[in-house]
Image (cartoon, helix red, strand yellow):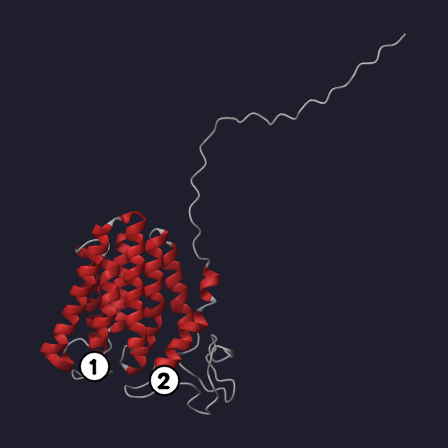
Amino acid sequence: MTRSHATESVPHQPPPIRPGRPRPPIRPGRPRPLAVLALTPLLRYAVVRHAVPTGTSRRTGCDACGTPIGLDRPWPVLGPTARCGGCTARVGPPPGTVELAAATAVVLLLTGPPTTELAAAAWWLAFAVPLCFVDLAVHRLPDRLTWPAAAGTWLLLGLAAVTGAGSEPWLRATAAGLSLAGFFALTTLLLGARGFGIGDAKLALGAGALLGWYGWATPVLGLLLAVTLSGLVALGLLVTRRARWSSHLPFGPYLVLGTLGALLLVW
């Protein structure tokens, strides 16, 4: 006589957890470079629209043939080739320059600060990049770009203050932005055309706020870098006879470069 043994199902036991190194905390994801570079048509569009002389309405089409320029039909005029789709004439900055500037800004931001501060720097650069090209082309910094750059930077730094940084750096950033802009405006009032422009003062609002977040010495460093760089370029142009003592050089691009240089030193 045989006896049958009942088989009971044994519940699956998870393998024991072995002690090891603790997992690093999950950090918020940073923007992918390719995703950010997909926005370069917007930057080129801002340059094409606003790189017009003072008193002239914004550009809406190709200067050569009148073909409309818009985000609904971005290629090829708003692409790296920067050519009109109707007559193949070049429109806006040289091919690849806006894209190269945007790629450089993305690389710098990827090595930068925490996410909340990164958002403020990215916002300001999104306006500063086209402003550089506009200033180089027509020696002006339009309000449609300078004011949103300053306001958005100030608000995003305020968000960083609320989410953990505290009010002290935000108040210092506010004071630094107003002080730097006031200095630029004062030179315009006292020196006229020989001083900085009012557009430079508006651009300095956001630049000063970004730099002032990291301390009072950082805006001074950024301004010194900008003035030094512009002086070296002006000296080179004078030596090569590509400019005269009476020539007026745009200062906006040097202010942006000086701001980036100072930020890289404190990040």
Whether 73 is drawn above or below 32: the answer is: below
Residue 200: x percent and y percent? 22, 73
Q: Which label's residue is closer to the chain start, 2 or 1?
A: 2
Residue 48: x percent and y percent? 39, 80
* Label 2 to label 1: alpha-carbon separation: 23 Å
Q: Is residue 112 visible?
A: no
Q: Residue at x 16, y 64 (%)?
A: 179
- Residue at far bottom of view: 65
The answer to which quarter of the image holds residue 249 is: bottom left
Total marks shown come to 2
Residue 154: x percent and y percent? 27, 61
Q: Is residue 263 visible?
A: yes
- What crowding class fits label 2: few (fewer than 14 Cα within 10 Å), some (14-19), or many (20 or more)? some
As drawn, is 114 to the left or to the right of 72? Answer: left
As drawn, is 31 to the left or to the right of 204? Answer: right
Which numbered disc covers residue 248?
Answer: 1
- What crowding class fits label 1: few (fewer than 14 Cα within 10 Å), some (14-19), or many (20 or more)? few
**Residue nearer the viewer, 212 or 3:** 3
Whether 87 is drawn above or below 251: the answer is: below
- Residue at far right of view: 1
Pointer 2 with pointer 1, Cβ within 8 A? no
Foreground mark, 2 or 1, reads: 2
Amino acid identity at mark 1: His
Amino acid identity at mark 2: Arg
Whether 101 is drawn above or below 2: the answer is: below
Instruction: Classify the position of the N terminus by image quarter.
Output: top right
Q: Disc 2 designates what residue?
A: 58
